Amino acid sequence: MPDSSLLIISHTAHYLKEGKYYGWGATVREIDELADIFDNITHIAPLNRGLLSNQDDIYKRSNVVFVPAVAAGGDTVGDKIQVIFSWLKNYNLLARNIRKHTYVHLRCPANISLLALVILFFTPGKHKNVWIKYAGNWQHTNQPIAYRIQKWLLKKKFKKSFITVNGFFDGMPSHFRNFLNPSLYDEEISGNAIEKTISQPVNILFVGSFESYKGTDTIAEIVKYLHNKIAYELYISGDGSEKEKFLDACKNAGVAANVHFMGWRNKEELKELYKKAHFILLPSKGEGWPKVLSEGMAYGAIPVSSNVSCIPQVLARVQSGACFDWQDYKGFGDYMIGLANDNALWQRQSLNGIKAAALFSYSAYKKRIKEEFIAE
C-alpha cells in the first residue's frame, strides 16, 4: 500500500502542558493503536483551557501529530454565536488537511464534525475514503438540530463512506456497520483467565463522571434498596457535580459507610478495582457503548446497566449481565441480590464476560479496519 495517511477530526478536548498536548486517555490510546496500520496520523480536535485530570494522556507514537482547532460550544445564545466564529476559523484548517490526507476519519456528533461533513460533501471523489464513527446512541431522540442534521447527512449523502455505529436498529441503512469500541490490549485479555467467586460483602463499582445523566439519583436509590438485604460496598471511581447531593442522600439513609469515593483513577489503578468488583454498575440515561462495561467484564465484573443504545444487544450476545430502565432501582437491586445468593450463576456470567473480552480488543478492531476500510 502506498501512502496511507489518516486524518482524524474529533471533538475530544485537548490541553497544553509544558509543551505537550494531552487528550482523553481512552481516545489517545485508540489513536496510538491505529498508528500501527497507517503511515502517519494527524488528529485535529479542540484545544481547551483548563486543568488536566489523571484520565488525560499524551500520544506515545512518533507518527501521530496533534493539530489544535478552535474550541467552541455550549447552551447559551453567546455560545451558539461562538460556534459560528469557530467554524470560520477552523474551515481552512479542516479543508486543507482533508485534501492532503489519503483517508479521513470523522467522529460524530459534534459541532466540528458537522463542519467537516459540509466540507467533505463538497469534496469530489473523497467519500469512499472516509470513515465516519457515530459515537453516541443513534436512536436517541430530542437531540440538538446540529446532531439531527449530521444523522440525515450520514443516511442520505454519504452512502459510499464507511460508517460505523453502536449496535443494530430498525431501518438501519445498508452502508452502516455495527462496530464494537475497543479498550483492551491482548496482554490484558490473556492475563485474565481467573476464576472469581462471589461472597459478601458484594463489591459494586461505578466508573465515570458523577453527573445526573449517569443515573446518580438511581444509584442512591439502589444502595438504599440493598441496605439490610445483602452486605455490599459501593466504590465510585470518578467525580462530578452530583457527589455532595449523593453523599447527603446516603447519610440520610444510613448507608454512607458503604459508599467509597475513590476519585479519578488511571488505567492501571482501575485494573485493581475491576479485579475486586463483582458488578460494574451503570444506570445511565444515555450511552453509546461504554468502555467501562467491556473493561469490567474483562476482569470478571458483571455489568448491570440501563437498557439504552446497543447495551442490551451486546450483553445478550455475550450472555453476561442484565439491563433495566435507568430508573428501575428495584430491578437493578433484585438482580444483584439474586446473583449474590447464587454463586454458580454469578460465576457462569462472570466467565462469559471474560471470554467475550477479545471482542473489545485493539487487535480485533484493527483487523476489521484493515479488512473493511483500508482494503476498499
Image (spheres, rainbow, N blue to C red):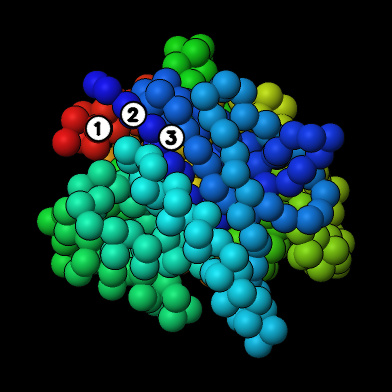
Residue kind at label 3, given as amino acid type: Pro
Q: Judge depth for marks 3 and 2 and give the one in front.
A: 2
Give the mark nearer the N terminus: 3 vs 2. Answer: 2
What amino acid type is highlighted by mark number 2?
Ser
Q: Position of residue 198 (x, y in %)?
A: 57, 29
- Whichever of callouts 1 and 3 sits on the residue coming sooner in the sequence is 3
Report if residue 335 is visible in the image: no
* Quarter containing the C terminus: top left
Q: Position of residue 348 (x, y in %)?
A: 39, 28
Residue topped by disc 1: 374
Q: Where residue 349 sits: x, y (%)?
A: 40, 33
Disc marking residue 4 = 2
**Outermost residue, bottom direction?**
77
Mark 3 — residue?
182
* As drawn, 116 above or below 149: above
Judge by depth and name the residue closer to the eye, 111 or 70. 70
Percent x, y of residue 327: 54, 69
> Which corner quadrant holds the N terminus?
top left
Question: How crowded is the residue under tag 3: few (<14 C-alpha within 10 Å), some, or many (20+)?
Answer: many
Point 45% across, 28% down: residue = 40
Q: Nearer the viewer, residue 212 or 102?
A: 102
Residue found at x 73% / y 46% = 15
